[in-house]
Image: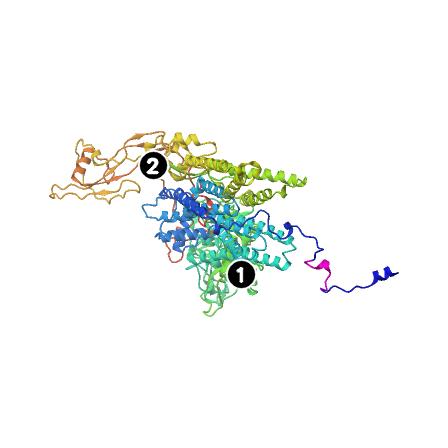
Amino acid sequence: MTRSRDTLEVKPLPKSGRSPSRSPNSKNRKKESAGSSSYASDGVTDNNIFALPTKDYRVLAFITIVAAVVRLFRIYQPSSVVFDEVHFGGFASKYIKGRFFMDVHPPLAKLLLTLAGWLGGFDGNFDFKDIGKDYLEPAVPYVAMRMLPAVMGVLTVPLLFLTLRASGCHITSAAMGAGVLIFENALVTQSRLILLDAPLVFFTALTALSFTCFTNQQEQGPSHAFGGLWWFWLASTGLCLGATLSVKWVGLFTVAWVGSLTILQLWVLLGDTRTVTPRVWFKHFFARVFCLIIIPIGFYCGTFAIHFLCLVNPGDGDGFMSSEFQATLNSKSMQDVPADVVYGSRVTLRHVNTQGGYLHSHPHMFPTGSKQQQITLYPHKDENNIFVLENQTQPLGPYGEVPGIFAWDNITTENIYDGAVLRLYHPITHRRLHSHDERPPVTDVDWQFEVSAYGFEGFAGDANDLFRVDIVKSASQGEEAKKRLRTIETKFRLIHVMTGCVLFSHKVKLPEWGWGQQEVTCARGGSLPNSLWYIESNAHPMLPADTEKVNYKHPGFLGKFWELQKVMWTTNAGLTESHNWDSRPPSWPTLLRGINFWGKDHRQIYLLGNPFIWWSSTVAIAIYFVFKGISIIRWQRHCGDYRNVNFKRFDYEIGTNVLGWFFHYFPFFLMARQLFLHHYLPALYFAILVLTQEIDFLANRIKSLGLPSKPVIGKLLMGVFLTLSIFTFTLYSPLVYGNPWTQDACRKVKLLGSWDFDCNTFHTDLNHYVTQYVGKAAAVPTTQQQVPPVQAPPVQAPPAQAPLVQEPPAEQPPAQQQPQEEVKEAASEVEDPSANVTPEALPSIRGKKARVEFRDQNGNVLPESLVAQLQQDGKVSVETRYEYRSRLANGHEVDVVDGKVKVAPPPPDVQGSNPETAENKEQHQPVEDIPAPVAEESSVAVEESGSPEPKPASEGNEATD
């Protein structure tokens, strides 16, 4: 009983008032293992790149100088347009002129290229229209523009060095990795031209460095969280993400890489219940939301704000945008117009779905079908867009019906309501909108009918001219606009009364006889978006001056920004046409095919990676996948590998960059659009990181292999690898710099048959690249011949050839004064079937013939004796001019003059201008300043598949591209 009583007795609490088991300092509590004390990672040291040894900075300076030498070597070469300089150089011209354009890429890199050109004195007058177009004669500061991507390419090298050091690599390994990047042929080629890939790789590398440094701070545990360096690198990661995304949308892959690793970090934090309270976890969460989401979005939007500030004038790309967007551009805005549409109104009808082309007619007939007058969709303001809205019956006056199309001009205005039956009269040609049971000239299908303009002046029309108004209430704005026609606000269909089809247009262009304008048909069951129309301009003499007026609503920055994003996405997804030099993702890691960038004067620039580096990096990726597969199996078998610190660090550090490679490579498998080898370059950067880290673990960190104890062997291994990389770079460097090369040297290094650079392009001997100019003494006199005097303007010498030398004639008496003649000096006669020239946009030339001819300004051949005499008298101006009669592969001959093919110019108005109204300067702008409205047009001539000639990629699409 005593023991029971003691058991039930309530004992007082200790003085602390808390149970010993709940005290944090309780001696009875079991000690936790050191590994579970916080979320800090094992084996991590503070790799602060701002506190590296002095030796690191000396190495950093050295590799930067070497990178500058490699990338800036002969950057002025070639002195003509290369590959996509057609697009991105052209965009710089439009930025300077302020002409709106549409590109599928965000604007940051293009703005930087424009800034570089502007600082170099570029005035925007050069159009970068064709590959091979000369820079020297128009004095384009192309070197200044190429310097921007070149400098970014140079700076990418020290960024990789610092990234490797921040991840824990030895200085020797980091230097080797930087050397590998320096001598990677594809990256060097891209960084020497006015292209976007060097800025893209630069900002991707900057993002990788920032996030690697942040991760290093994060993995050191709570003691470094929310410190100065922690915040600095987290915010820097956000800024770099915004910059990467603002160069190309490939930056979304970088965002996905950083985002996935951030989620992993937050997951690890969530598991640390001892040092990370819920309040601290949310602090981590919102810090990342602000720095990795808000900052990148703000940066991205900011670049578009600058983009809109620069492009204030109409240009090639405004046809992609809505009417509201176009109204924000200079000279595209319009004055307020009357809101109510009445019978007799002079109106212009705009199509809703194909970027707002105008219903249009001109006095040209269809060559097939009814052969009546053409009705088209035309993208520019023009007097041929005006139609008069007539009622199906004439108005009644005091003495009966009032005849004529202007019968409504002197009576009370009458609104046009839903269901009204109209006729649309074209006052310029005196014909009415008309449809009938005829197939369209292009879209020959049974559910579409031809739409034409039919009639003549004074003709009352027929039943096929009648169209019924069908207001689409869901697309119209305002209650009144849903009941009757109102300018801009009412969206409606025009239903042909006789056939029941609806007025329809789609993105189909008419041939040359239709001036490249868009087809308009009458479709039975046509889709609603392509059948919607609205009235943009409206005028009637009986409308009072104080009538209600409307105009386009200003979309504001966010409205313009969001619309442009949608257009960019749609256009980018629509780039599905094949290209001569496109390739698919499976071929990239093994470097099966490159891209022909440029070819001229027996030289070529061909985008091809360093095969030794390329294949080695692919093997390194494969090694990690094999390692990961084996480690998962062993983990499942409880082998305990992850208790080894080096094993864990190998898995996480290399796995992080393999994940970056994965995110920058595999999404391309989901894309149907045209793709090129250069899309693999960001993934290649991560592959080089993986390759270097694996070599570093092998040589410096995995002690069981024995190499860390013998550093000389590891350094020798890295030296051999770097030497082989440099040797391979030099083998293919003529394709990087456009240097002289021989056919034999080319064939020896052409390892794969799929590498389709043409070795026959080059000379058989390097001595053939020495240009010899024939002097005055080269003309051997034979017999003299008097040539009648002819006056003609002097001919300018082409660039990069002998300059025009003109000497004043000696004074002579009038009776003895002889005329000044122009003598053209050419290369000596050669027949060289093996010497091939790669002219721009032509099939490869198998041979050429050249001969010496001396001609006057009328083209008459001069005898050598007269030439010698004129030269001695100093009465000639000598100009070197090359003319070839080239034999093509298809058996036809064309003239090649000064390295350029003489072809007939394109027909006028090929971009859609109307020849009947082209002279109307007040109604619309010139064709080159205003786009056709359809996105899939391309200003780049479409060549036959398989053409070996360089051709710009289509991703620089504009409205008239």
Q: Which scheme is used to colour this image of the protein?
A: rainbow
Asked which quadrant contains residue 760, the reply is top left
Is 19 in the magenta? yes
Front residue of 175/583: it is: 175
Is residue 866 a member of the stretch shown in magenta? no
Report how many numbered discs are placed on residues in the image.
2
Q: Secondary structure at mark 1?
A: loop
Name the spot of residue 240 as percent of width and height, x first.
49, 52
Residue hosting label 2: 895
Residue placed under numbered mark 1 in the picture: 490
- Which residues, given as a range, are shown in magenta? 16-25
In x, y percent, where is residue 498?
Answer: 55, 52
Question: Left of 166 or right of it: where is 770?
Answer: left
**Mark 1 or 2, nearer chain start:** 1
- List the single residue furthest toward the front: 2
Q: Secondary structure beneath disc 2? A: strand
Tell me the crowding category of disc 1: few under 14, some 14 to 19, or many 20 or more residues within 10 angstroms, Cα based. Answer: many
Task: Report whether residue 257 is seen.
Answer: yes
Q: What secondary structure characterizes most of the magenta part? A: loop
- Inspect the image, locate mark 1, and give the three-letter code of the amino acid beneath it: Thr
Residue 661: image x %, image y %?
54, 43
Q: Is residue 457 left or right of residue 794?
A: right
